[in-house]
Structures are given as C-alpha cells and as structure tokens.
Amino acid sequence: MAGLTRPRRAWRGAVPVLLAAGLLAGCTTGRVAEDGTTSVPGGSAPPTSIVPTTVPGTTESGRLSFLGSVERLPVMPVASGETATLVPSPGTRGYRHVVQVAYRQLGSGKPLVLIPGQDASMAWWSPPVLQTLAQHYAVTVFDPPGVGYSGPPSSGPSVQSFADVTAGLIGELGLKDPVVLGWGMGGQVALALAERHPGLAGDLVLLDTGIASAQSVEAEPSVRAVLDSPSSTLAELADLAFPPGESRARQAWLAELLGQIPDTVTSSAVSMEAALEQSAWSTRSLGAGTGSLKLPVLVMGGNFDPVFPAVDTVALASMIPGAQHYLWNGTGYAGFAQDPTQFATLVEDFTG
C-alpha cells in the first residue's frame, strides 16, 4: 500500500524461540528455583514435550473446517527480561503460576500471533479475516487468561501479566521471530511484550490502540460504558467497531461470529478487562520502554475509531523510534473485519 515501506531491520540480539536441534538433543538447561520454576539463560528456548489437548466440542466443520479445533496448553508466564521459560512439573509450587491457554492454529508461512482486544475472544478474528491471513502466514489466535476457553489468570491481571503469558505461549508453540499483532487492548499487550521481552517478536503491528500520554485521549465516557458493561450486547459492541455507513460489513461480521461454535466472554471477564484497561490509563504503566524498542513497528488506526481515536495512534507512533504510522481512512475500530483483504495486504507489505 502507498505510504508503507519496509524499514531496515535493526539487530535485536534475538535468539530463536525454539531451536529444533535443542529439542532433539534435549541439551538446553535452566536455573531451577525452589518453587519448581525454571528460567532459561540467554533467551534460549526450553525443550518441551507438553502435548496440547483438544477442547471437546470445538471442532468446526463445513465451510469453517479450516479452523480446526481449539487446543489448550499449560503456559508459564515468562519473567520480564527473559524470552523463554520452562513449565514447572504438576504438583510443584511453581505450577500454581501456570495458565491454561486455549488457541487455534492455521495456515502456513511466517508465524503471526493475533492478540484480541477488550471484550473479545479469539472468535472475533472472524473466519474471512483468518482465511485471508492464512494464505500468507502461520496464524495463531488465542483466548487471553480468563476469557473463553482459557483458564483464569494465575496472578493479578494486568496488561503486563497478559504479555508475559503471551510470551510463554509463543515459546511453548515454538514460534520463531513471529509477527505479533495486537488489536485495541491487545495492542497494549503486544507493546508490553516487546518492552518486557526484547528479541522475542520479529515484527510488531499495533492496531487501533494507544497508551496514556500527554498527546493521547481516552475514549468518550459513553464508549467506555459500552465496553466496560457486562450487559452490553454484541450488537452494541459492533456499533463501536464499524462506522455508521458500514452496516453491511457490520452485519456480515456479526453473522460470522454467530455462525461459529461459541467462545464465551463471561461477565467476570468483561469486568476484569474493564478494570485492567482503566488501570492502564490511570497509572500510565505502559510506554516506559518505547524509546528502546529495536524492531520494526507499524501502528495502524481507523479515522472513525471511537475506542482509540486516530490521535492515539499518532501519539503512539511518535513515541517509538522508526515506527511507521498508517491512518486507515473510512474504517473504525475493526477495520480488519471491514476489509480483510486490504488488512492482510497492509500487514504483508509491512512484514515482507
């Protein structure tokens, strides 16, 4: 797309997340703490023999068969400054930190991890979006802790703790230099992952997101009321995701969501994420490391986005050295669902 050029990749000191040779030889060692947790020195990936389990009743069929089934893995949050860790053995004290994370994988190519936004499960990346991306990427979608088929968070939820769990999932799945793409609150999680685990992500795409700063603005109270209320309907949330003139795209997206096997976002999950987002804005806990990021970053935003107004994406891009900014005209909070083909093209043009 015009205006998007591939930046020269800076050296990031990255170490591959899972080395096949290390897995086969079983030669990677770590430091074992008293509670059973193990950190892996130098960012080396842990050897893992954990086999995912299929979540019963989640196998799609017919035109959605390409989605396969939801799988679930025990994931250990990765400590800040590390890029990998080992899952403690069941029964040890360290195992209490483990989160059961549900995910789907499809497609082939460069790894791409999608982090959903507030109130969203992995099902919000609708089938047309995933099918389009899967033509170019090996796509991983997942439910954040406490959402859908994933287990509850193992500690007080925060953007940072969600980032640490995401880092653990990337390691357990053996994803090497993945493109990490976060939407809305998921973009904040993706940013925290890049700040806390340098060298883990290969590219960073921050979609319709922002962080508290002197230049950014929080969503209007009426918008926050819809996002934060457990009683809000999917139709009300969709009104925030699409501009008023895009009723056809809005209806198509709703139909795609309702046509899938349900992936529930409970009232408790909505309340948890509302508190998490409010904390992220009020404490200004994000962004301290943006000036030190050394990976290609694309910040995208719709000019009709009421959740993270365009000024937020401009402000965020200005805080990250070398970041590209793309203002997507005619789209709202869910431009990816409004035009999946253009969305995939924008991401592909950036990641190369």
Image (spheres, helix red, strand yellow):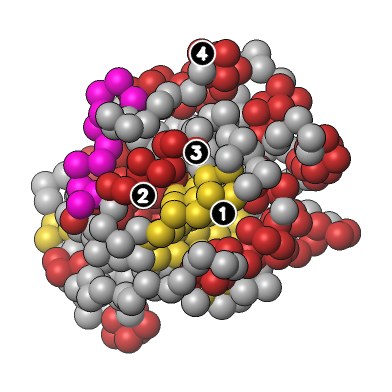
Q: Which mark is residue 317?
A: 2
Q: Amino acid at mark 2?
A: Ala
Which element is circle 2 on? helix
Residue 233 lies, in percent from the top left, at 71, 20
CA gap, disc 1 and disc 2? 25 Å
- Does any portion of residue 272 appear in the rendered image? no
**Quick check: 66 left or right of 63?**
left
Query: Which class describes the residues within 10 Å of circle 3: few (<14), some (14-19), or many (20+)?
Result: many
Which element is circle 3 on? helix
Front of the two marks 4 and 1: 4
CA gap, disc 2 and disc 4? 24 Å
**Quick check: 150 left or right of 133?**
left
N-term-proximal mark, 1 vs 3? 1
Q: Which mark is residue 141?
A: 1
CA gap, disc 3 and disc 4? 17 Å
Image point 28% across, 53% down: which residue? 320
Front of the two marks 2 and 4: 2
Which residue in the protein does label 3 denote? 310
Residue 297 lies, in percent from the top left, at 38, 60
Q: Amino acid at mark 1?
A: Val
Which element is circle 4 on? helix
Front of the two marks 1 and 3: 3
Disc 2 to disc 3: CB gap under 8 Å: no
Residue 88 lies, in percent from the top left, at 28, 52
The N terminus: image quadrant:
bottom right
Image point 12% across, 61% down: which residue? 31
N-term-proximal mark, 3 vs 4? 4
Q: Which mark is residue 346?
A: none
